[in-house]
Amino acid sequence: MKLKIKNLKFLKAQSLIELLVAVAIGTILIGGSVGLMSVSIKSYGTVKKHLQANVLIRESAEVIQSLARSNWHNIYDLTKGTDYKISLSGNFWTISTGQETGTVNNIPYKRYFQVNDVDRDESENISEEGTDDPSTQKITIILEYDNNYTSSSSISFYFTHSDNNSVFHQTDWAGGDSIIGPVVSPGNTFDSFSNIQTESE
């Protein structure tokens, strides 16, 4: 009978030890899970900010490209190395000096871009030193974001202007033959010739 009592006490002690070990393991696992959740939430927040930054930079790049294609001087005539911002005026995008500030999805940001001349070497490759190429401009878009603008992203690309990409635009002929060509945008005027002879086939 005494032997049974001793075995019972041993079993109770063993169960208590197992319980303590289980509690310790559970505490470690819960603590690790909480730590992983915290890291995951923080990583998600960082990725979300980076994605938002990419959207803002891409928007600027698309607007600047559109304005440059519409009129080369929209970009070329800007003061080199100066901060510029884009803004929507009615249905049209415009460029003005300064930096745009705002908040998207509770993320404060500062957005602006700069235009710089481009040099080419003797092989016509873009280089740090060489001869200025008036038909090429370098655009750099900068985005500073997060609290106190502690994070930043930027992208640089080049625009090349060619006379071959001009579009001929004629409104009408009401202005008469008061212009001498060739021209790109004659408006409502035209050039005329008389006594034109063609070779017979």
Image (spheres, grey):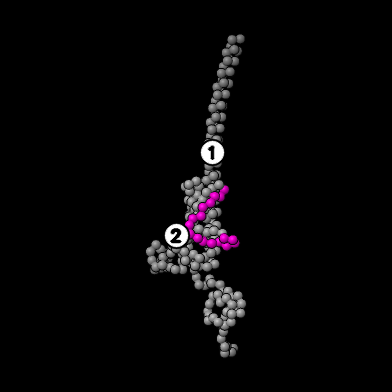
Q: Nearer the viewer, residue 60 or 131?
A: 60
User: Mark 1, residues whose alpha carbon is within 10 Å: few (<14), some, or many (≥20)?
Assistant: few
Q: Quadrant of the N terminus?
A: top right
- Along the horizontal axis of the image, is 171 left or right of 125? right
Q: Is residue 13 visible?
A: yes
Q: Is residue 62 magenta?
A: no
Residue 148's x, y, as percent? 48, 47
Distance between mark 2 and mark 1 Cα atoms = 42 Å
Residue that mark 1 sits on? 38
Q: Main secondary structure of the magenta part?
A: strand
Say whether marks 2 and 1 touch (CB < 8 Å): no
Mark in front: 2 vs 1: 2
Amino acid type of the residue tagged 1 in the rendering:
Ser
Q: Which element carries disc 1, helix, strand or loop? A: helix
Q: Nearer the viewer, residue 62 or 145?
A: 145
- Lower sequence index among marks 2 and 1: 1
User: Mark 2, residues whose alpha carbon is within 10 Å: few (<14), some, or many (≥20)?
Assistant: few
In the image, the segment drawn in magenta is 89-105
Residue 137's x, y, as percent? 46, 64
Q: Which element carries disc 2, helix, strand or loop? A: loop
Residue 200's x, y, as percent? 59, 89
Q: Which residue is depicted at the point 59% across and 61% down?
A: 90
Q: Nearer the viewer, residue 187 or 184?
A: 187
Q: Which residue is depicted at the point 46% across and 61% down?
A: 115
Amino acid type of the residue tagged 2 in the rendering:
Thr
The quadrant holding residue 198 is bottom right
Q: Quadrant of the C terminus?
A: bottom right
Residue 139's x, y, as percent? 47, 61
Residue that mark 2 sits on? 82
Q: Is residue 97 above or below residue 37?
A: below
Q: Is residue 108 above or below residue 83?
A: above
Q: Which residue is depicted at the point 60% across and 75% down?
A: 171
